[in-house]
Image: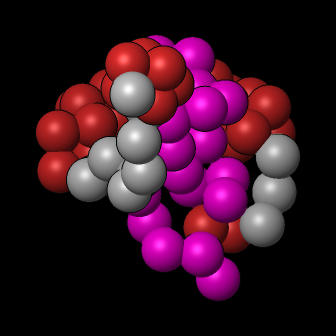
């Protein structure tokens, strides 16, 4: 399994679903659908998403803007 870090590419909002998809070996689209369906159930899904957005580190590597500056 891959390390849990928010990727710089393939993310829509914060990269949490993309990070979880890489970790569990599924597509980001599937993980987003699972998250949206889970929002129909009672629970702290949005708070968990926000917490993961803050707590998960960004993926290592240079961004495209930093790469083009050099």
Q: Residue at x 24, y 31 (%)?
A: 50
Up the image or down, 58 lies above or below 69; here it is below
Residue 64 shows up from this direction: yes
Relative image position of residue 48 (x, y in whole percent): 28, 41
Relative image position of residue 67 (x, y in whole percent): 46, 30
Relative image position of residue 32 (x, y in whole percent): 67, 31
Which residue lies most toward the bottom here? 1
In this image, 46 relative to 30: left or right? left
Q: Residue at x 73, y 39 (%)?
A: 28
Relative image position of residue 30 (x, y in whole percent): 81, 39
Instruction: Please identify the quadrant where the C terminus is shown.
Output: top left
Up the image or down, 20 lies above or below 15; here it is below
In this image, 15 relative to 49: left or right? right
Instruction: Please identify the quadrant where the N terminus is shown.
Output: bottom right
- Magenta span covers which residues? 1-22
In this figure, what is the number of numbered marks? 0
Q: Residue at x 56, y 55 (%)?
A: 20
- Residue 59 among those drawn in magenta: no
User: Residue 23: which quarter of the image?
Assistant: bottom right
* Type of secondary structure dominating the magenta stretch: loop
């Amino acid at each position: 399994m891959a390390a849990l870090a928010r990727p710089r590419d393939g993310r829509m909002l914060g990269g949490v679903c993309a990070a979880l998809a890489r970790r569990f070996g599924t597509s980001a689209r599937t993980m987003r659908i699972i998250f949206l369906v889970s929002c129909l159930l009672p629970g702290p899904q949005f708070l968990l998403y926000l917490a993961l957005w803050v707590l998960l580190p960004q993926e290592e590597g240079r961004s495209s803007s930093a790469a083009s500056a050099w």
